[in-house]
Image: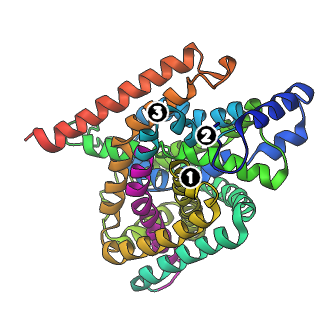
Amino acid sequence: MIKNTFTHEVQPKNEALMREATEYPDSRSNLLKAIGPGILVACSAIGGSHLVWSTRAGAQYGWSLIGLILLANLLKFPFFLYGQRYTAATGESLLAGYRRQGVAYVYIFLAINILTGIINTAGVAMLSGVLFAGYGFDGGQVPVFTVGILVICAAVILLGHYRLLDKISKIVVAVLSLSTLVALGLAFAHGPVASPDFTGPSAWTWQAFPFLVMLLGWMPAPVDLSAWSSLWMFSREEETGHFATPRESSIDFYLGYVMAVVMAVAFVALGKLIMYGSGQELVTGGTGFSQQLVSLYSANIGEWSKPLILTAAFSTMFSTTMTCIDGYPRSLAASCTLLSDSFARRFKQIFQLSIVLSVVAACVIVLYFVQNLLQLLSFAAIISFVTSPILAYINYRVMNGSNVPVEERPGPFLKLLSLGGLLFFLLMTAGFVYVTFIRV
């Protein structure tokens, strides 16, 4: 019998959650206990995709990419949903579902996790350090700030474990949402900076295609984050003593996902209202990017708003950094426990070691890319997008496995949406290959 990445067997967990769902179908207390993994997904998602790519989308192309951003969120929706629904329905992690389909799928996930994990962690941490420097510190100390943020986040995970991560994430999401929406309201009150007759560049050209891929790569997040929410469900159970039912996990997921979508639109709007038509382009240097981003916002809303804008941006990236330092090592450790019997009971040790190694590797990357922040984030976003079809297909296959109760498998709408998403990812990836390697 396949076991999940912790110590629970599939069938006993399944029987317990089904019995609880029957006896207490509308327990508000249990629902509150189940809410957590979805909020962490929101913390992970509202990061580089929103602050960097959504803002740039609005700054460069105005409102023209809103539809594409909403479409990407819609088409990725089922593959993120499957992470939590599969675990709630079967009592095992999504990665254990990968193992059921064949050990090759676990190796594929592990390879993608290692390839993207360190780069993404370094990128979001560096942006956090850059933004922290905006509070009046010396921009030349960005590498020091970044390393400090990485160490602090690692300490939170190693010492506070999931409980502290969960509490901090909920506070950060509240601060982020409030400050971003206030800033958006002020921007609307001020009005757009572009003149009424301003016509910006078109986003629907081959020249703009690489930017579209970068935008969608992290919109709302890389697909591999679906495994994180699955694993966080077990940590949430250990904290509360309650394992979420399929209905409860869906509500938790919807809360986080809708929040991520709303914030994506908000950052596009901020970029459009404050930067579109201003005649300035975002610079690629780390410190310069931070200073320009915050100064453009505060110059148009008012200098008094600078702390508000800076806090919204820093909160965004700090929360993303923290969840990355937990999520990537957690999924790596979970994969190892599924690949080797000798690792099966050493999840905690592998998880802790992975955190240390990933932070050290991220620090090394930071030292080399501090002046090329956007190039680093661009590379990470592209890798995340081109691997999306692979992980999306595996998630779909796992959710239709014979061990999943028939009533929890994707219905006609989710099947159609899943197949549409797979086709969209493949066509966009083919387009990127054409533009990058074939088209002159």
Task: Give the residue displayed 35% in from the left and 74% down from the top.
Answer: 370
Label whose residue precedes the other's in the sequence (1 or 2): 2
Q: Quadrant of residue 213?
A: top left
Mark 3 or 2: in front is: 3
Q: CA distance from mark 3 to mark 2?
A: 21 Å
Question: Tag count in the figure?
Answer: 3
Q: CA distance from mark 1 to mark 3?
A: 23 Å
Say which residue label 1 marks: 341
Where residue 249 sits: x, y (%)? 72, 36
Name the amino acid type tagged 1.
Answer: Asp
Task: Give the residue displayed 40% in from the left and 50% down from the top.
Answer: 112
Task: Give the residue displayed 60% in from the left and 76% down from the top.
Answer: 152
Q: Quadrant of residue 84?
A: top right
Label whose residue precedes the other's in the sequence (1 or 3): 1
Dot 3 lies on which element?
A: helix
Where residue 116 sits: x, y (%)? 40, 55
Label whose residue precedes the other's in the sequence (3 or 2): 2
**On screen, 201 above or below 153?**
above
Toward the right, the furthest residue is 23
Magenta stretch: give its range.
108-137
Task: Give the residue displayed 50% in from the left and 35% down from the top.
Answer: 73
Say which residue label 2 marks: 257
